């Protein structure tokens, strides 16, 4: 029992020390750009794309290394459990013709230590590979840039969603405070006998519904905070607050520039990626064609040979040998393999050219569509603002009429409902406009 108590105390002390060693939940306050920069450093897709760039660098170095001297060391040892037997003609030793005498040549133990070296002197495929190394690295750099753009878009939209949720909570708080005041006034008037109980109930129902909507919105707001933290690669237990506000977002900027139709596709990372891929495919076609040409390499070797019937004396005497030479390899016939590889590479180039042409049309269409959606979103948002102001004015007049006894509670509750609908439509229009702005900036290649 005493031993068990000691173990429990030690375990408790260890757990306490472990908990104290854990970092406390960190708190961050980010602007939109801060959130994007954090995602560049912590989101796995961006980090992996950056690692792909490093891997491409190593791949280029690997290709370059093929033109350096290739040196290998070799070592071998043999123990002939039975030395091979060779039959020699008997007449050599004075025996009758047609007879053979078995003779064993060699020793029981042998060993070889050597160094082999080769140097590529001429290989068209290697030369073309060196010419395409910059294009190969450019492909991965462009892919990394496209991943960053995708992340920028996703993070910005998630940030805007939070800003819209916060604006929605503000509107709900204002409506709840206004409705609470009206409810208190109606309850007081009911006690004095100026209004009926049903008027109190109507406003109470609307008030409760509005409070419930606010609670649901707050839960959704908390969830969207988690979504933003996930998008930027931040642990969800960290605390995050927003520095940017809706007033910082200029929805109507660059309107004159957007009205001018330009070749927006050239600014898109996707188009540049396809262009680079096409150039790389053309290099590959040249490399495959170069396989029809001869290759030349130099080679050399130096070997130490050891032989003895006694393992202990195996390395007492050495028999060195060495050579240098040239190897010329001339392709003659490979069963049409090289020809078929060329045709496959030609088809790959054609497909890349088709994809590039289609991408040009698709990206131009995307830019036109994004511009249309943006202008429609702005117009809808402006209309929703005006509707919201009108609904607020209608509610103000309905409340005055109701307080003066010339209006009904139904008019007030209906006006309150209309204001809530106008607020909801405004919130939706605001989010749509913000998202369409992000899509427009991406379509015109402004996000880099």
Image (cartoon, rainbow, N blue to C red):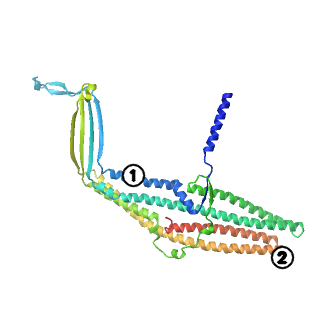
Examine the image and state in which quarter residue 137 appears: bottom left
- Residue at 53% x, 77% y: name it: 256
- 20 or 55, nearer to the observer: 20
Measuring from the top left, give residue 323's x and y in whole percent: 21, 42
- 43 or 277, nearer to the observer: 43
Instruction: Tell me if I can see residue 253 in this picture.
Output: yes
Q: Does residue 138 appear to the left or right of 127 in the view shown?
A: right
Examine the image and state in which quarter residue 203 appears: bottom right
- 319 or 415, nearer to the observer: 319
Mark toward the start of the polypeptide (1 vs 2): 1
Q: Which mark is residue 106?
A: none
Examine the image and state in which quarter residue 3 appears: top right
Measuring from the top left, give residue 167's x and y in whole percent: 67, 65
Q: Circle 2: is it few (<14), some (14-19), or many (20+) Cα within 10 Å?
A: few
- 399 or 358, nearer to the observer: 399
Measuring from the top left, give residue 315's x and y in whole percent: 26, 30
Secondary structure under the numbered disc 2 in the rendered image? loop
- Residue positioned most to the top: 95
- Residue at 42% x, 67% y: name it: 357
Instruction: Tell me if I can see residue 342 in this picture.
Output: no
Q: Is residue 377 above or below residue 9?
A: below
**Do the residues bearing badges 1 and 2 touch, measured as CB atoms within 8 Å?**
no
- Residue at 27% x, 53% y: name it: 123
Measuring from the top left, give residue 445's x and y in whole percent: 49, 67
Q: Disc 1 to disc 2, how far (Cα)?
A: 83 Å
Q: Circle 1: is it few (<14), some (14-19), or many (20+) Cα within 10 Å?
A: few
- Residue positioned most to the right: 193
Screen quadrant of the N terminus:
top right
Q: Is residue 70 above or below residue 417?
A: above
The residue identified by callout 1 is 58
The residue identified by callout 2 is 406
């Amino acid at each position: 029992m005493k031993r068990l108590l000691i173990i429990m105390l030690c375990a408790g002390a260890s757990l306490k020390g472990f908990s104290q060693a854990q970092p406390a939940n960190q708190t961050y306050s980010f602007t939109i750009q801060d959130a994007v920069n954090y995602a560049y450093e912590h989101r796995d897709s961006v980090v992996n794309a950056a690692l792909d760039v490093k891997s491409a660098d190593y791949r280029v170095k690997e290709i370059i290394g093929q033109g350096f001297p290739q040196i290998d060391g070799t070592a071998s040892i043999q123990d002939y459990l039975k030395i091979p037997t060779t039959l020699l003609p008997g007449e050599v030793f004075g025996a009758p013709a047609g007879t053979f005498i078995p003779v064993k040549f060699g020793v029981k133990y042998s060993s070889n230590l050597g160094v082999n070296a080769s140097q590529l002197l001429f290989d068209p495929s290697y030369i073309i590979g060196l010419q395409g190394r910059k294009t190969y690295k450019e492909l991965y750099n462009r892919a990394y840039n496209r991943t960053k753009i995708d992340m920028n878009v996703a993070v910005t939209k998630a940030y805007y969603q939070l800003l819209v949720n916060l604006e929605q909570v503000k509107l709900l708080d204002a409506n709840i405070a206004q409705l609470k005041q009206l409810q208190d006034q109606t309850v007081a008037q009911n006690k004095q006998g100026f209004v009926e109980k049903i008027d109190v109930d109507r406003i109470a129902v609307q008030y409760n519904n509005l409070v419930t909507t606010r609670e649901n919105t707050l839960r959704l707001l908390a969830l969207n905070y988690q979504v933003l933290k996930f998008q930027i690669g931040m642990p969800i237990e960290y605390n995050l607050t927003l520095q940017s506000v809706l007033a910082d977002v200029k929805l109507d900027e660059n309107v004159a520039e957007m009205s001018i139709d330009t070749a927006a596709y050239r600014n898109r990372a996707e188009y540049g990626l396809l262009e680079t891929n096409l150039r790389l495919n053309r290099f590959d076609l040249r490399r495959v064609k170069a396989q029809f040409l001869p290759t030349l390499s130099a080679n050399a070797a130096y070997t130490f040979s050891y032989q003895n019937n006694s393992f202990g004396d195996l390395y007492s005497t050495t028999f060195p040998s060495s050579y240098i030479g040239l190897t010329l390899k001339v392709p003659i016939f490979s069963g049409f393999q090289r020809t078929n590889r060329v045709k496959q590479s030609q088809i790959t180039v054609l497909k890349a050219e088709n994809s590039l042409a289609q991408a040009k049309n698709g990206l131009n269409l995307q830019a036109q569509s994004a511009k249309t959606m943006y202008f429609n979103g702005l117009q809808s948002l402006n209309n929703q603002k005006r509707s919201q102001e009108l609904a607020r004015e209608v509610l103000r007049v309905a409340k005055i009429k109701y307080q003066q006894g010339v209006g009904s509670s139904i008019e007030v509750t209906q006006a309150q409902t209309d204001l809530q609908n106008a607020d909801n439509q405004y919130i939706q229009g605001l989010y749509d406009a913000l998202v369409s702005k992000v899509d427009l900036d991406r379509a015109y290649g402004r996000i880099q």
